[in-house]
Amino acid sequence: MSNNIAPEEEQKICVGCGFCCDGTLFIHAVLKPGERTTAPEKIREQVFNEGEKDYFWLPCTYFSDKCLIYDSKRADVCGSYRCQLLRDFAGGKITLEEALGVVKEARAMRSELMGQYRHLTGNNEEMHFIRLLMKLGKLQETGREDEQPDMDLEILLARCNIFETLLIKHFRSAGDFGKMQITNDVKPAKTGDKSF
Ligand code: SF4
Ligand code: SF4
């Protein structure tokens, strides 16, 4: 397990973000061999196995606007994962203000998409972004019960694609793509493996 603490300025970026924990970027995170039994309790409750690797489902139940166990021992991936945005910031490619601006813009876009989905479907349940994509995928396959023209749905899907492009550009690294995995349970979503 890890209690890696990021540099203070990187923490400022992460605290306003949370995308790698809350189901916006990934649907699961990988555990190191042997961590299955030693990871924090709520992570252990969300563990599953695929091939020779152990994973835990995201959103993480320790996430509530921020990591609730940040200062404690977490899974190794929690301390070691660094998205493209953090790498760009650490490498001097963007300033702190720019990084914070990217996070702010992404959060605003995501919340707009969630609002549009609720408006379109009347479904007010709390859900993370990848689940929203899965729901939209299903809707696209089956059509809506009220048989309204699907133009609104198509527009929402197009906006989700734009949002995903932003996530890919700013948050997912090329390494993440190399590790992308689709499980049977999450087929419609573009999911990655939080596993540095
Ligand atoms: S996605 Fe990047 S900036 Fe956001 S919380 Fe994760 S590591 Fe931090
Ligand atoms: S323990 Fe904290 S850092 Fe790790 S996945 Fe959960 S919320 Fe994120």
Image (cartoon, helix red, strand yellow):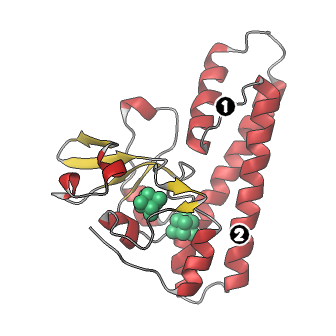
- Name the quarter showing ligand 2: bottom left
Q: Amino acid at mark 1?
A: Glu
Q: Answer with left or right where residue 46 lies relative to residue 166.
A: left
Q: Nearer the viewer, residue 183 or 27?
A: 27
Q: Position of residue 150 (x, y in %)?
A: 79, 21
Q: From the top left corner, tell me how far across and down residue 164 is, in percent.
A: 63, 51
Q: Looking at the image, which residue is at 53% across and 48% down?
A: 23
Residue at 77%, 56% in the rendered image: 108
Left or right: where does residue 4 sit relative to residue 88? left
In front of the other: 117 or 175: 117
* Circle 1: element type: loop
Q: Which residue is mark 1?
A: 125
| Residue at 62% in and 64% down | 17
Residue hosting label 2? 102
Disc 1: CA contacts within 10 A as few (<14), some (14-19) or many (>=20):
few
Front-most of 63 and 160? 63
Q: Earlier in the sequence, mark 1 or mark 2?
A: 2
Give the amino acid type for the residue marked by disc 2 in the picture: Val
Local packing at callout 2 (Cα closer than 10 Å; few below 14, some 14-19, many 20+) is some
- The quarter of the image holding the N terminus is bottom left
Q: Quadrant of the C terminus?
A: bottom left
State the image quarter where residue 127 is shown.
top right
Pointer 1 with pointer 2, Cβ within 8 A: no
| Position in image of residue 2 (x %, y %) | 30, 71
Does residue 196 appear anywhere in the picture?
no
Question: How far is the residue under mark 1 from the one under mark 2?
Answer: 27 Å
